Image (cartoon, coloured by chain):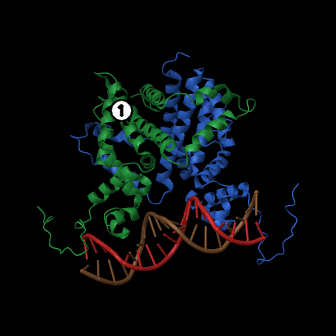
Chain colours: A green, B blue, C red, D brown
Amino acid sequence: MSVVGVRREPVSRRERPAKPALSRRGIVDTAVRIMRAEGLEKVTMRRLAQELDTGPASLYVYVANTAELHAAVLDALLGEVDLTGREGGKGGKDWRGQLRAVMTSYTLVLFEHPQLARSALVARPSGENYLRLVERILDLLSRSGAGREQVAWGVDKLLQDATATAAEQATREHDPHSEGDWSVAVGALHAVDETTHPAISAHIPHLVSGTAEDRMRWSFDVLVNGITGTPVPGQAD
Amino acid sequence: MSVVGVRREPVSRRERPAKPALSRRGIVDTAVRIMRAEGLEKVTMRRLAQELDTGPASLYVYVANTAELHAAVLDALLGEVDLTGREGGKGGKDWRGQLRAVMTSYTLVLFEHPQLARSALVARPSGENYLRLVERILDLLSRSGAGREQVAWGVDKLLQDATATAAEQATREHDPHSEGDWSVAVGALHAVDETTHPAISAHIPHLVSGTAEDRMRWSFDVLVNGITGTPVPGQAD
DNA sequence: ACCTGAACACCGTTCAAGT
DNA sequence: ACCTGAACACCGTTCAAGT
């Protein structure tokens, strides 16, 4: 193999434990560690460089820019998604139950790392863990018997829905600033004039009702029912 | 009224056209102008202050922070959404056609101002134009005859879907950096091994097929069909 | 080829002090 | 009450120069 490990350089700088060579792997691992400890907003080129005992310019040899770095962090995290479809609920499952379990696992992983969900929506990921996830969802959804195109487009919708939900819900929980945002929005709904906004008035309790779990479950069913029951335009597959 | 307009101060600073007093209105209007001309990323406190001939600290009298400012800009933009439901397609429409037209108008407005869609997903808006939009969508969707709770939750899904689609599609078009992102993702799909990722291989053409319009139309139908056909958990409304 | 110091061109937000 | 200068504590990215 390589000569890594054979120390040729004298221990010059203080007693530091020998600064390891830079590598994309090491950079991403460090980024993940910072994110887990302090959140994605602390995963900056400068902070990362500091952690790796170098200057920010050095990172650009391995990472194109901050967005690419965040994408790499996201893919690393997607390794935690349970693809088996066994999690949650009771015992033996059909494709729908398994798919629900996979989507739930994906959503929960993103829930723990809110800011990452935003990145996922904007810069479509293409890492190996993402591909594994897409493969699994495609496989499960195709067992519904729906047309190939419906299945392909449907996977997109399922992932988009889960990602957007995580990005939304996330803010309400973690971001110190926007804690009030949610209550402001709810307040705006309640403050609405019944004569100018009759529909809002009529639906008021339901607009804010339901637990996150209930809404997620319903969303999943809405999408799966819609996907399997709605042919793509101009095709009777 | 007030004494605004009665000039008491001598024209000291050069020949500037008399710096107008700061106001939330003026700040938001200027923010909208900058965004239209140069994009949301240029709408910063510092840039705005410069444009208004003051220091950034002055803005904090009228705006809590950057997120709140962006939310105000978003609501101003939502004033452009066509709520009539007459746009597009041919003549007289039922609720479904009208709702489709409203959602399309909403999506197109966000398409023109990509970065704003991202804000909308994260900080739920609560401005007057947003409330008008919600009112209209609720009204149209309730004509489907679906239960009140389905309708209320459904409006959320419709808005989330359109917003997420705009946020995604947006990046591909405007952001100079992520132009390549899309092709990278498509490339990753094509480069996939048929034996390790059989489902992706089998669905390859469909995963990237369809125009934005076709996908939007299909998404709308998927959601409306799903929403109206899927009762909320534990309720037979 | 890889790494770096230093610079360029920015950020949001706070706060004491002024009017 | 409103406004401000100045400061604090940061950013991403580039580039010429070094090894």
Q: Can see residue B53?
A: no
B6 or D14, which lies in front? B6
Picture mark count: 1
Residue positioned 50% across, 20% down in the render? B231
A133 up-or-down from B52: above or below = above
Chain for numbered disc 1? A
B199 up-or-down from A27: above or below = above
Left or right: A84 in relation to A117: left
Counting from the top left corner in percent of width and height, residue A111 is at 42, 40
Q: Can see residue B11?
A: yes
C1 up-or-down from B125: above or below = below
- Report the quarter where the N terminus of chain B lies: bottom right
Q: Secondary structure at mark 1?
A: helix
The residue that label 1 is drawn on is A148
Counting from the top left corner in percent of width and height, residue A49 is at 35, 65
Residue positioned 65% across, 48% down in the render? B77
Counting from the top left corner in percent of width and height, residue B63 is at 66, 55
Residue type at tag 1: Arg
- Report the quarter where the C terminus of chain B lies: top right
Residue furthest to the left: A1
